[in-house]
Amino acid sequence: MCVTDLFLKLNGASDSFKMLAMKPHTGRACAALILIFSTCYFPACRKKSASEKDFYRFIDLLKQENILTSPLLAKAGALTEGVYPINSMEIAEAGIGENPLGLKRKHSIGATESNILFSPPRSEFAFDVVIPENGALDFGVGIVRDQNSENARVVKADEEKGVEFIIILEMRGRKRTVFQKNLRPPPRDKSRTLNISLNKVDLSYRNEKARLSFITAGAEGSFSFWFNPVLFSRSVKKPNVILVSLDTLRADHLGSYGYTRQTSPAIDSLARDSAVFLSAYATAAWTLPSHLSLMTSLFGFNHQVYHIDERMDSSITTLAEVLRQNYFFCTAITGGIYISPQYGFAKGFDSFSEAAGDFSVANSAERAFQAASEWMGQNQDKNFFLFLHSYQIHSPYDCPPPYNSQFLAKDAKLHKVQLLDYVGGRPGTFKPLPEQERGEIIGLYDGEIRYTDEQLIKPLLVRLKQLDLYNRTMIIVTADHGDEFFDHGGWEHGHTLYNELLKVPLIMKFPDSKFRAKRIESIVSLVDVMPTILEELGIDDKDLRMDGRSLHPLLNGKTQDDRVFFADRKSRITDSNTSQRVTINEGKMKLILNKVFNPQELTYYLYPPPPTPPIELYDLREDPAEKKNIADERAELVRRLTAQVESLYKNARPRQPAKTKMTKELEDQLRALGYLR
């Protein structure tokens, strides 16, 4: 069997937030929800040892015996979705434990999804604890008003009667109320509305045995809840983790990777305090599968999410899930769309928001920083994992002045551009443009990088230092893929597997700047990020099924070997006729296997794609731009790597990715980003 045939076989808040009424997707209110739903704490999700009694996450701890009373007890045999808030579902992830009466829920309001403990009046939950040294009780309270709550309300005349939230501490045989607040119901509206309040109670009792009771009382049928109630010690300080994904950022457009334009002074400053991986590869050339690999340490053939209507298999373990089980509070501030709960990304996060990074505004990077800054200010006394993602660099290139023109000539004709629209949509992917226009498009892209550097990365580093968090925080800056500017005869991303799309920055600042100024030439993959974080935090990962390996051996100089990277794409992943492609390496030799377009597929394009052979092989050491195909000269290597690809697909873990619902809103967002026509 020839190599080509072998490949083709594969193609088969604080008091300032006392009350907030909002409708879904209302700008500033959505951004505020990030902070409110994110501000509670973390863990108690496995059997505690003596040293782990500093952490009580009450959502995880709740069992049937902790429920002293609840109106849902009378309906235990006939619970329906109508008794719970609309757009809420039972939490289903590691560490949650049993879920009596379905009270442990992920609740989506607007662009934020958070973990709540549903507690309609009258409810009382009681827990036996040991108050840790320098203890604090952190929690939120809220009332949601929707059609289900209106149907559940027993006495309509009581509709304006609020809910009393009470916490009672019982210790040494005496009871005292440590918290009591009446929360008024939100206003009635056609859609859902919400009133919320952030709270923190100081519990300065050192290692005292106690009982905490959480009580809601008030109008029967009210949909009240506690969100992320946690008791923790402010004296326990582990390293924090901030993972920043700058969507569509090419490594070769950063100063720390050799770019001559001043696009990234803040990132370059961070790089000097960090380990910089000079040959890091994404697992896909577009957002969804690449981020899934980043957050799960699985290559595409093992997570099996390739198309825009697929979501992550619920059996897959995420980075956030592992960290949450190990006493970190996990929150995400993202640009949404592909990075959203709809695709399974909220798994393991206590709070997941799509509001601040909204791609539809020209200053999304600045908004993402503002949300992250306020969140860190409210959570600086906790051990946390913050995932921060922005589409700012992604087309359309339309950042605010002066950044939009910083790298343009005075006579430039383009001052903003939606790249795919400019070339005619996906059918225009391979449209040739005059060199001046190409240069202006690159200038606009570089302006987006500089804007993101100035408005997100620079103030983020300043804020961490102001909060005295910088030295004990692990900061990782990376990207999911790059963008093509006709490097190989095409525009944007998703259509090829060349280095301009797969080679991404990977900058790792460790606690106390360990490994500062290390520049690692060895090839690595984004699947290596998760195991590296876990090793740095001392978390045992031997029972996890990951494709990546920790980068610590490279950092410690124990090896200089290149890792094997793997990336692939299926045919027709978005609204296009792009064909299946696979790439793998052996050292610095990179193999690309292409399913060749048939004549009918070619009719889709306004301009013909450049001729693409079914097999490409490049020596990245001698030919980093991938211009000289040497497949014919290295037939044995081609056969060996192709057989390896076939084996990887054959032995992939069986997955059945669920289908995600393609809402009109999601379709509109994908269309605005150029993924759909």
Image (tube, helix red, strand yellow):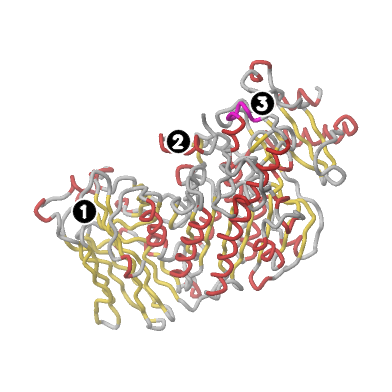
Going by the image, does 550 lie left or right of 208?
right
Tell me which label, 1 or 2, sits earlier in the chain.
Answer: 1
Q: Residue 11 got which mark?
A: 3
Image coordinates for residue 165, horizontal then vertical, percent: 24, 66
Q: Residue 217 got which mark?
A: none
**Where does label 1 land, which residue?**
187
**Where does label 2 land, which residue?**
668
Answer with the quarter of the image where residue 478 lies: bottom right
| Residue type at numbered disc 2 | Asp
Other-residue count near label 2 (Cα within 10 Å), few / some / many at <14 / 14–19 / ≥20: some
Q: Residue at x 57, y 73 (%)?
A: 465
Quadrant for the N terminus in the image: top right
Give the CA separation, mark 2 to mark 3: 31 Å
Inspect this view and state whether residue 615 appears.
yes
Image coordinates for residue 596, horizontal then vertical, percent: 72, 23
Q: Secondary structure at mark 3?
A: helix
Image coordinates for residue 278, horizontal then vertical, percent: 75, 54
Q: Residue at x 13, y 50 (%)?
A: 154
Residue 631 vertical placement versus 216 (above, below): above
Give the CA separation, mark 1 to mark 3: 55 Å
The span picked out in magenta is 424-429
Seen from the viewer's position, the closer of residues 677 and 2 is 677
Residue 28 vertical placement versus 310 (above, below): below
| Residue type at numbered disc 3 | Asn
Other-residue count near label 1 (Cα within 10 Å), few / some / many at <14 / 14–19 / ≥20: some
Residue 672 sits inside the magenta stretch:
no
| Residue type at numbered disc 1 | Pro
Inspect this view and state whether residue 77 appears.
no
Q: Secondary structure at mark 1?
A: loop
* Residue at far left of view: 157
